[in-house]
Amino acid sequence: MLNKRHSYFKSELKTRAEGEDDKYIEGYFSVFEQETELWPRCFEKIARGAFDNSIKNNDIRCLFNHDSGFVLGRTASKTLELRVDSYGLWGRVKINPNDSQAMDVYARVERGDISGCSFGFEPKGEDYEENDDGLHWTVNEADTMEVSICTFPAYPQTEIQARKKDFKVSQKRSREQRKIDLKKKLEGIRC
């Protein structure tokens, strides 16, 4: 079963026109090493290198508001360009001038009405640490399926519910890891 998660943030999306018909939306879909509070006392950040495998191997789509029926571009058709730099995951989607919905999104970004970005991923490698201020996840590898231009760069209720389930799973993993660590310590004392 897929454990797809979304990560949202406000971006500096920009529009750019090249020639008469070539229009682009570009900006950062994720920023490295910036912690985001998912809910009280639970934090997540994306590590440098988390997207490397996805960029090389996946056919990633650019969607509007995570709607798989509203595809703006994709890497396989070369209408979506993604690259990783020291700051994060940067992308540029070429807008189809014959797609009125895509042109509407372009116009809204151009006016500044839409400025949010997100990406949908399945965590393939993550670490977590429990501190006095809560749980801190670091996503080391994100199997990225899509990037999205979003109206609201905040978690909708359904996503919060999915994250709460992740939190319960992580609490269980934390307890199991503590048991293993304690068992190893006790075995070391007995030897």
Image (spheres, rainbow, N blue to C red):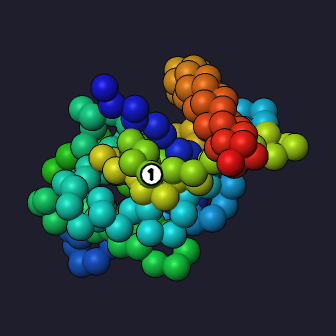
Residue 18 to residue 170: above or below: below
- 100 relative position to 139: left or right: left
Task: Name the kind of residue labelled 1 in the image.
Answer: Gly
> Considering depth in this image, is 54 or 152 the residue closer to the camera?
54
Residue 77 in view here: yes
Which residue occupies the extreme front position in the image?
A: 191
> Considering depth in this image, is 17 or 116 the residue closer to the camera?
116
Question: Looking at the image, which residue is at 39% across and 48% down?
Answer: 124
In which quadrant of the rendered view does residue 59 lie?
Answer: bottom left
Question: Looking at the image, which residue is at 13% across and 59% down?
Answer: 76
- 85 relative position to 127: left or right: left
Question: Looking at the image, which residue is at 39% across and 42% down?
Answer: 122
Image spot of residue 42 (x, y percent): 72, 38
Image spot of residue 28 (x, y percent): 49, 64
Which residue occupies the extreme left position in the image?
A: 77
Give the residue at mark 1: 125
Residue 112 in view here: no
Residue 26 to residue 39: above or below: below
Neighbor class of circle 1 (other Cα within 10 Å; few <14, some 14-19, many 20+) is few
Image spot of residue 45 (x, y percent): 61, 55
Q: Find numbered disc 1 in the image and state the secondary structure of the residue it sits on.
A: strand
Question: Looking at the image, which residue is at 31% across and 26% down?
Answer: 1
> Considering depth in this image, is 177 or 66 the residue closer to the camera?
177
> Considering depth in this image, is 175 or 74 the residue closer to the camera?
175
In which quadrant of the rendered view does residue 54 lie?
Answer: bottom left
Residue 139 to residue 49: above or below: above
